[in-house]
Amino acid sequence: MPVTIPSLLERKRRGERFAVLTAYDYTTARILAEAEIPVLLVGDSLGMVMLGYRTTLPVTMEEMLHHARAVARGAPDQLLVGDMPFNSYHAADEQAIANAASFLQAGMHAVKLEGGGRVVTLVSRLTERGIPVMGHLGLTPQFVNLFGGYRVQGKEAEAAARIESDARALEAAGAFALVLEGVPRSLAASITRSLTIPTVGIGAGPDCDGQVLVINDMLGLTRDPLAKFVRVFAPLGDQAVAAARAYAEAVAEGTFPDDAHSYG
Ligand code: KIV
């Protein structure tokens, strides 16, 4: 059964927590569909984990759409969300709407936008046009230069109140879900209680309706230091290094390929 936005809202009503993972390619999308992960995010984190940029800022629409199409081919029945890259939605204008529409034409079911007040008008314009929007508040990586690094947001009362009011404004504008990244657990819990749309936490504690992680991080593929909130569920990076070494040794020794892997 395809995962839909109404079915996600129903999960919140029933108090059922759900998992979200990022996906950037066809094979991973197929694996995550097999694992029945309901929501896949083609995050602009692909700039860092797939393309090797230092931040998400250089990521282009073209790069995002290339990966979005691959994920859509691999997991057409999951709820697929495409992340709008930096500078692709800075004005709530026709260009931003056209960029969002390109994600749906690439097989995504929704887009994700970072920020509060500034994007609220755009969220309602997109929703009116049938383009569902996931919001994203807190430590929004596209604002890394303003934040002076990847720092937890909403620790002071004033900042927390601003994030809470942005969350309410995004819900009122029609957002169907809200990512809360890098905020104190108590703030995420309070926002989660006050909204009827699901919250999806990352570094926001256990009280959100859903949780999201970057797939490369949770599979142990990321070689850079990991944030405190990441758990590695399988050390695939170390296993890949060992496998590559074993292959190279077998080639050097002449034990691969053997008869079983050769044509008669
Ligand atoms: O780009 C991304 O992967 C994200 C999630 C981690 C929320 O925005």
Image (tube, rainbow, N blue to C red):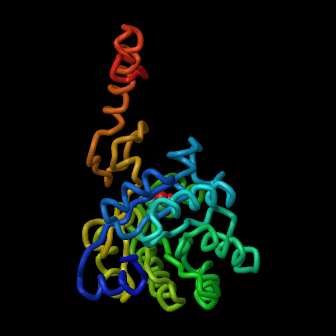
Residue lying farthest top? 253
- Quarter assignment of residue 82: bottom right
**In the image, residue 171 above or below residue 201:** below
Residue name at image x 38 percent, y 21 percent: 247
Residue 238 visible in the picture: yes
Q: Position of residue 104 (x, y in %)?
A: 60, 74
In front of the other: 229 or 158? 229
Does residue 238 appear to the left or right of 95 in the view shown? left
Q: Quarter holding the C terminus? A: top left
Q: Position of residue 28 (x, y in %)?
A: 43, 52
Residue lying farthest right? 94
Q: Quarter holding the N terminus? A: bottom left
Q: Position of residue 192 (x, y in %)?
A: 33, 80
Tally of marks: 0
**In the image, residue 212 above or below residue 174:** above
- Quarter assignment of residue 180: bottom left
Residue name at image x 54 percent, y 81 percent: 132
Residue name at image x 46 percent, y 84 percent: 165
Does residue 263 appear to the left or right of 185 in the view shown? right
In front of the other: 66 or 13? 66
Q: Position of residue 213 (x, y in %)?
A: 37, 58
